[in-house]
Amino acid sequence: MAITANMTTHNGRELTNAYCVIKSVRVKKFDTHEENSDEVMEKKESFWKLLYEIEIYENKDKRDHFDSNMFKIKNNHLDMQKIDFDISSSSNLYSLAYENLKMNDHLSNVKDA
């Protein structure tokens, strides 16, 4: 799975049909705490997030290069994303991540690659 999209990086570089691949996906549990009357922190609630990391390349050829790391493009707007996640969901984590990435406000002209 991959997408192509137009974007402007955090440092102003304009990219047309950049090749974007989700490198990793994980689910993480977050706990919120509050202080009780004895000034002791107590767990209040938990929630889950889906975190995914994105690799960006100028095009697919750069991604397929034997040393693709030297062609990675940094974009602080996109490199790591975090979205709400329902732990009871049976959906594929990568599919959820790609669905979310396609709707990202920093991308335009998004297409499946």
Image: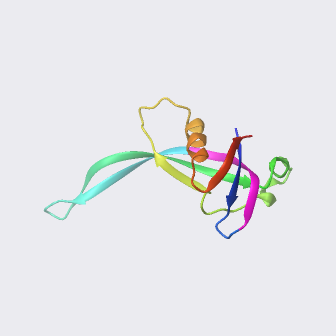
- Quadrant housing residue 111: top right
Q: As drawn, which residue projects farthest toward the bottom?
A: 11
* Residue reaching furthest to the top: 90
- Is residue 14 in the magenta section? yes
Q: Is residue 53 left or right of residue 55?
A: left
Dominant secondary-structure state across the stretch colored magenta = strand
At horizontal 57% and vertical 54% (from top left) the residue drawn is: 105
Residue 69, image x, y percentages: 78, 57
Q: Position of residue 75 (x, y in %)?
A: 66, 62
Q: Nearer the viewer, residue 39 or 28?
A: 28
**The one of 49 and 109 positioned closer to us in this rendering:** 109
Residue drawn at x 59%, y 36% is 95
Instruction: Name the image quarter holding residue 102.
Output: top right
Q: Residue furthest left?
A: 37
Residue 7, above or below 4: below
x and y, in percent, of residue 19 in the image:
75, 49
Image quarter of the N terminus: top right
Residue 93 is a magenta residue:
no
Name the residue rendered at 56%, 32% in the picture. 92
Decide: is 68 above or below 76: above
Is residue 29 toward the left or the right of residue 93 in the image? left
Task: Report the label total.
Answer: 0
Quadrant of the drawing holding the C terminus: top right
> Up-down: is 74 above or below 55?
below
Quadrant of the image occupied by residue 80: bottom right
Indicate the colouring scheme: rainbow
Magenta stretch: give its range.
13-25
What residue is drawn where x is 13% and y is 62%? 37
Q: Position of residue 74 (x, y in %)?
A: 69, 62
